Amino acid sequence: MSANPLHPAAPSGQGAPAGGGAHRFQRALAGLGDGVDTPAAIVLADVMQANIDRMQGFATEHGLELRPHVKTHKCVEIGRRQIAAGAVGITAGNVGEAEVFAAAGFDDIFLAYPIWPAGSKRERIRRLAEQVRLRVGVDSVAAVHALADAMAGDPDRLQVVVEIDCGARRSGAPPEFAGQIARAARDRGLVPVGVFTYPGHGGSRRDARRAAADDQQRALISAVRSLAGVGVTAEVVSAGSTPTVEFSDSSVITEIRPGEYVFCDLDNMRLGACGEEQIALFVAATVVSDWVPDQVILDTGTKALGREGSAERGYGGVAGTQAVLTKLNEYHGFLGLPPGEHRPAIGTVVPVVPNHVCPVVLNFEELLVTDSAGTSLERWPVDARGFLN
Amino acid sequence: MSANPLHPAAPSGQGAPAGGGAHRFQRALAGLGDGVDTPAAIVLADVMQANIDRMQGFATEHGLELRPHVKTHKCVEIGRRQIAAGAVGITAGNVGEAEVFAAAGFDDIFLAYPIWPAGSKRERIRRLAEQVRLRVGVDSVAAVHALADAMAGDPDRLQVVVEIDCGARRSGAPPEFAGQIARAARDRGLVPVGVFTYPGHGGSRRDARRAAADDQQRALISAVRSLAGVGVTAEVVSAGSTPTVEFSDSSVITEIRPGEYVFCDLDNMRLGACGEEQIALFVAATVVSDWVPDQVILDTGTKALGREGSAERGYGGVAGTQAVLTKLNEYHGFLGLPPGEHRPAIGTVVPVVPNHVCPVVLNFEELLVTDSAGTSLERWPVDARGFLN
């Protein structure tokens, strides 16, 4: 069974609780009393705000523009806090997310995805480009033509950022092709403004993350040169991600697009990309059955947590304990109790910390927002949760 | 790389397409033309209706009542078709699902889950029990008392069904304790009506599924005797699930609660619980990037499909091909192309068949409903998608 890295005695040494005694999530739950129907996604606003401020401070200190990815929270209220702290705009993962945030007044949106405009997406992108300063990702000449066709008579309303691959072997052109794509965009009247990439091949160790960030750096330099070769200046040189952001070098990079930093999670903690005290979201779960030795059943399954994990890592842990979810069904979480671990009684509400926070948020209609003392409770809708395309 | 079991030449021998030439999903997509923004969940209504009718026919033929689990579709329109075909009522997995279907006029609902009534759930359950014939699962004396407290002066409006474990080691009391729980319910004025279980330990081979069904049968017999021992007649003896339903023995079992049969998926096909021609739902996905050899990127990641799969099985396959999703990010699906497989061009829309259909439906706001000829297109809301608790 996996050790729960949230436990103070966990071997990672990163699990010391923020205060003495009960974990802050347990204190927040105690403060909320009987008012929470589980499963519920609960955000500690003070911890979240500190995350927002810390990342903004890092960006400002290093001369980088921060453009947070809203995929993690999909929540207008949180996006507003990121902008208020100094973010230059937002990053979205699909057209629907961009529409929701545009309708809420966000006026600078980068769709960091190689959008293929077909069906109603043509008209939707054209409309978005009228509403806000819209940038979209593009990694092929074919997509350049499709976007230019979609923009009909107004191609210069749409800025494009060329996506390049820096080793993740996902989307993105080889860096040396960036110029060719930018030139095609310019020839069709679109406005090429720069390049972006995502160093998703970092692996789990800090030196591996640094190596991925180095790959990112080299690929971006090469892509900027490729743009210069066709006479396009890269105003935007945009980099990911929460786990690699600490290695961002502003001699090349102009902008960072982390998303998960706002909440953090066990996966980022395992990567060393956050500390335990930065985790700002947990799922309140109730013990609903307790017949099996060394296990209780929680009312959090894949429909709340997604199936993010593995037999080795487990599927999430209970804060302040060594208990780990060893298996999930759709409505059931199998919480393994290591020898000596306290066995929570049926009806007990426990704080489950997810491995990967993004799919969790997507599952809920609203976030219950309190603070580490459990003294306030607001409800913020997950505004863009349904907008998949 | 995993072989795609949907391919006609797949080693499983189950992959023959329903008609000559293109797969029926590809024909449906061609019929829909340019009108689909991807990713989209597309249902072939004719295939789905045949699944509904087939399961109802099986139940009727074997003298079993069919109470479909709505967790799979969460869609009022589909629930109505199941009732119209002869289902006695529906099964729900949480209070929110039950509320949505009750509000839509469904009047016989079994919450097949060990509900713990706390917070507003007390009032919500009481209200539901006034609206519909409500049955809830219970697997402990503690929950009996909590439910009786929640029902205040009206405990006899609530029927309870004792959950027993038949080997899945999930929720459910040992069968020999069923009587004790039923007696506690009766003593508190609740109405114990029977027992239920879920044979989730079946494994992947037909003989293993049969063995799990045999365990289920033995456990239910034991639980019925336990109820009889305290003078409670088990009117309801309720069994799962799509993969084990074929082994249901009506000499003991009165009711079956399959859910996934309505759409089917690759996992059920691998289990031998459905044929390829029974799969009624796919996700339309667009090729958005094609720079990596032997791979293209689709716009379907975990936010559309969930992370249901493994490196061995993959995360879904393209119908009519041997191509399998080998990896998912949130908005990106990595579609591996085996040697000799046709490489779909950027902008092509392809039909992705999920491993596990339930989490997919949950991700979408609506189902696009057509038929195998692509001649009709309706939109059905996924009514209960947001109701997690």
Image (cartoon, coloured by chain):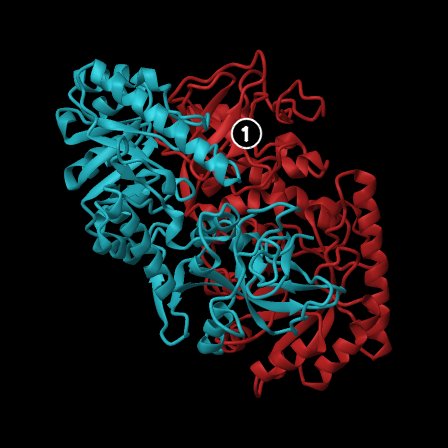
Chain colours: A red, B cyan
Residue that carries the numbered disc 1 in the rendered image = A325
Q: Residue at x 48, y 74 (%)?
A: B27
Q: Is residue A159 above or below residue B4?
A: below
In depth, the one of B64 and B235 nearer the eye is B64
Q: Is residue B94 above or below residue A151?
A: above
Report the side of A318 relative to B166 (left or right).
right
Secondary structure of residue under mark 1: strand
Q: Amino acid at mark 1?
A: Leu
Which percent across, then down, holds residue B305?
A: 53, 53
Q: Residue at x 41, y 74 (%)?
A: B374
Report the side of B327 relative to B376 (left or right).
right
In depth, the one of A92 and B353 nearer the eye is B353
Res. B71 visible in picture: yes
Number of other residues with Cα within 10 Å of mark 1, as a class: few under 14, some 14 to 19, many 20 or more: many
Which percent across, then down, holds residue B275?
A: 46, 55
Which percent across, then down, holds residue A340?
A: 57, 11
Q: Residue at x 58, y 17 (%)?
A: A338
Q: Residue at x 61, y 62 (%)?
A: B9
In depth, the one of B139 and B227 nearer the eye is B227
Number of marks in the rendered image: 1
Which percent across, then down, holds residue A16?
A: 65, 22
The quarter of the picture where residue A217 lies is: bottom right
Q: Quadrant of the C terminus of chain B?
A: top left
Q: Is residue A15 above or below residue B24?
A: above
Res. A42 visible in picture: no
Of all residues shown, which one is farthest toward the top? Answer: A340
